[in-house]
Image: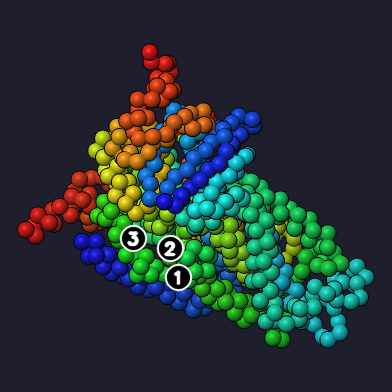
Amino acid sequence: MSNKTGVQIKKKKQRNKIIELGIITTLVIIMAIILPSIIPAFRLRLIGRFLSLAIVALGIDLIWGYTGLLSLGHGIFFALGGYALAMHLNLQIPEGQIPDFFNLYGVKELPWVWQPFYSLPITILALVIVPGIAAGLIGYLVFRNRIKGVYFSILTQAALLVFYNFFNGQQKIINGTNGLKTDSSRIFDLVVSSAGVQRTFYIITVISLVLIYLLCRWLTSGRFGRLLIAIRDDETRVRFSGYDPTGYKVLVFAISGAIAGIAGALYTVQTGIITPSIMEVAFSIEMVIWVAVGGRGTLIGAILGTMLVRLGQTFLSESFPEIWLFFQGALFLIVVTVLPDGIVGWWTSYGWDKLRSLLGLKPSLITYPSLVEDPDVQQERKEMSEQ
Amino acid sequence: MSKILEIEDLTVSFDGFKALNNLNFSMNAGELRVIIGPNGAGKTTFLDVITGKVQPTKGRVLFKGRNIKKIPEFKIARMGIGRKFQTPRVYLNLTVRDNLDLVSNQNKNVLSTLFGRANNNETRTVGGLLETIGLDTKANLSASLLSHGEKQRLEIGMLVAQSPDLLLVDEPAAGLTDEETENVGALLLSLAQSHSIIAIEHDMEFVRQIANDKVTVLHQGALLCEGKMDEVQNDPRVIEVYLGETPD
Ligand SMILES: Nc1ncnc2c1ncn2[C@@H]1O[C@H](COP(=O)(O)OP(=O)(O)OP(=O)(O)O)[C@@H](O)[C@H]1O
Ligand SMILES: [Mg+2]
């Protein structure tokens, strides 16, 4: 019996995998091939930005949705990735010169932190690894001391403020409040803001989003993913089962930070500038809202939530700029009170069945214990009929 | 016979209040020991110390001859101590099978959990355990859908999946129906054939069912008496602490 259901479950899983793969492929074709040829460049750039934000939302979902640690400091990692790529682009100037803004502060020599960013491969590595390590270090200090819950959130926000103020103060190194512009820089001898380069960045963003989504799926599907859920639900129990939660939490936070770094880099080149204001508290909180709206612990919800909130914001703020903020507040309140599991959570627990019963299909198992569907009863019935 | 657990002069004080007070205790490998005592006697605290959750103020705990002082909980668990909590604590958002699978994982460090898959051995353990705890038909249900008694059994199964030498079970019969209590009792007795077990319990009926070996009575953080169930039951001191007055 249990063997048989095992096989059935495997088959169903396989079928679901194929369906999912189909959906992803279709979406990629639409987003990466069709969309760029039918919408104007400035819209494409906007969508590219939203997709970058969806990437950081995936990172938030890993650490918050699955592991139960609400980070309010992801702006740090997002900014680190953004600055890394912006520094590389600012160095695409004739030999011997240094970026213009240094003149404002009388800096004559390129600061040492800039040196590695001449190289594109090192930059790409750095925009993943630097935020990853930063997150890993913060995580290690916090988790080792068993700080969790609200205290973790507060600490990440405090770290965000520290970084924010630090970046603002470093005029001689990274142009302080003014930040780094990327639009007029060149890459492979092309202007970054030109349509061709922007489209390339857009396509890279789509691909990165898919790859990172798959990475997150892999991380959350096996034993490792179940352990994250276990840590979220009952960390003490995990400890008494012989696992050390600290290592797991540090790793997930580091991965989440690295993902935010990639998102930050892609966002920056499709925005044209990065300034420390990206580390304002409100922005990091907004990231959390996207995930809450879409549905925690679902991954797809993180992407959906980001796109919905951001597209809604664009639409509403273009048509009615004065009400957007109210709308965002209302949206958040609605989600928290009416859809605590977000859109995807609501859909899987309620909407899907509703739709099926509307279409006259049999509802899938929802209520237990109901006698007809009790596995013990089913088992007995089967044994009876076999006799 | 070798001692699996020895506790010497154990004192635990919380801001001066002694939850355990100069407690001495020892137990042979293979024994099923029942610990009883009124509310607040320090029974749960006793388990907290053995599992490393609380550090002793004074005294020491030897598990298989090794002092467990300052060893973190997860390492003590890996040394071979499994613990069931007073209220059932299973992972509600995972299926019954996955609950057992997580614990049965033989290599619990980060990388092997990330890259490893359940080996045949572990799959077999989980399959066997599902049968032992009588949940094989519900293996693929989410643990949140289990009844209270089923959760208790699942948690006991999780302990065993850890393949520990010593099982600590805190009030496994609390809140169960008579039938479920019987089930859990039978489960403990069958586990006792291959494990050392400390069971904490209030329900005297249940204690009578499982107490074949010694029973230890705790009172106000200290050992009140120890012996066979019928000896203990008739001990005037025990009657006094349970009924609040000296029988004449
Ligand atoms: N962390 C703590 N801080 C302060 N006092 C505590 C702490 N933990 C336990 N105590 C106290 O220690 C005493 C023993 O508690 P314990 O939980 O060990 O009792 P118990 O024998 O398990 O009781 P019960 O049968 O009700 O479960 C109680 O008086 C309790 O209030
Ligand atoms: Mg207790």
Counting labels gives 3
Say which residue label 3 marks: B126
Check if mark 1's residue and mark 2's residue have beta carbons within 8 Å.
Answer: yes
The numbered disc on residue B54 is: none
Q: Are marks 3 and 1 on the same chain?
A: yes
Q: Secondary structure at mark 3?
A: helix
Q: Secondary structure at mark 1?
A: loop
Residue drawn 64% across the image and 80% down it:
A197
Tell whether A327 sits left or right of A218: right
Residue drawn 38% across the image and 70% down it:
B119
Residue drawn 49% across the image and 32% down it:
B223
Name the residue nearer the viewer: B183 or B227. Answer: B227
Tell whether A356 sits left or right of B241: left
Q: Within 10 Å of the Cα at label 1, are there few (<14), some (14-19), or many (20+) other Cα atoms? A: some
Q: Quadrant of the N terminus of chain A?
A: bottom left
Q: Is residue A233 visible?
A: no
Say which residue label 1 marks: B116
Q: Are marks 1 and 2 on the same chain?
A: yes
Tell whether A147 sits left or right of A353: right
Residue drawn 23% across the image and 45% down it:
A370
Say which residue label 2 marks: B105
Residue A325 point in image, percent of width and height: 61, 48
